[in-house]
Amino acid sequence: MSQHLVQVRPAAEKDIPHIFRLILELAHYEKAPNEVINTEQNLLLHGFKSNPPLYHSWVAETVHGGVVGMALCYIRYSTWKGPVLYLEDIVVSEDYRKQGIGMMLYNACLQFAKDKGFKRMTWQVLDWNTPAIEFYKKVGAGFDNGWVNVSIDLNE
């Protein structure tokens, strides 16, 4: 499928089931299918019912109306840089990869960041995810090996 048969647009409420399906697909790809505790209801609440929304998202849709990819970003704040767009995930269904759809989604996020006047967009990639690493190298992203990821679960 060529790029001209796919359109990237801002996600709408009707896309939540598709976004959630892609999130589950990503979790399976990243060998962590049991780690997803988010729900479609939370995605709806946080992305479309909160003011301001907690995230922004885009979907890649075929001319036949099928959602085959998504990108999800949120705004974080850097004490050094000010507002930064954090790219949480780009997901393209397996059958549609290597067709430029990921680049279209990436560019939608990048354009959003530029339109908002952000000076930086950041994200993480798993060290074993060679296709993603190669994709990010292709777009000229810098890799920082000097930082260690830290988190704490608050569900317990």
Image: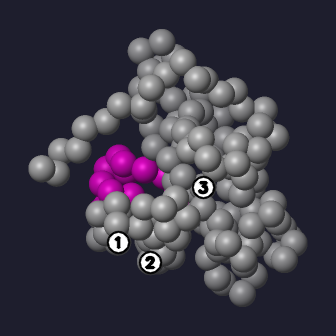
| Image coordinates for residue 63, horizontal then vertical, percent | 75, 82
Side of 148 relative to 115 (left or right): left
Seen from this angle, which residue lies furthest bottom? Answer: 64
Whether residue 115 is visible: no
Q: Amino acid at mark 1?
A: Glu
Magenta residues, start to end: 44-58
Q: Which mark is residue 17?
A: 2
Q: Amino acid at mark 2?
A: Pro
| Image coordinates for residue 76, horizontal then vertical, percent | 42, 32
The foreground one among 117 and 92 is: 92
Residue at 54%, 39% in the rendered image: 124
Secondary structure beneath disc 1? helix
Q: Find disc 3 in the rendering and name its residue.
A: 90
How far apart marks 2 and 1 lie (CA) works out to 6 Å
Q: Find disc 1 in the rendering and name its residue.
A: 40
Secondary structure beneath disc 2? helix
Neighbourhood count class around disc 3 (C-alpha, 10 Å): few under 14, some 14–19, many 20 upward: many
Secondary structure beneath disc 3? strand
How far apart marks 3 and 1 lie (CA) works out to 18 Å
Whether residue 100 is visible: yes
Q: Is residue 68 above or below residue 127?
A: below
Tell which circle, 3 or 2, labels the residue nearer the N-terminal end.
Answer: 2
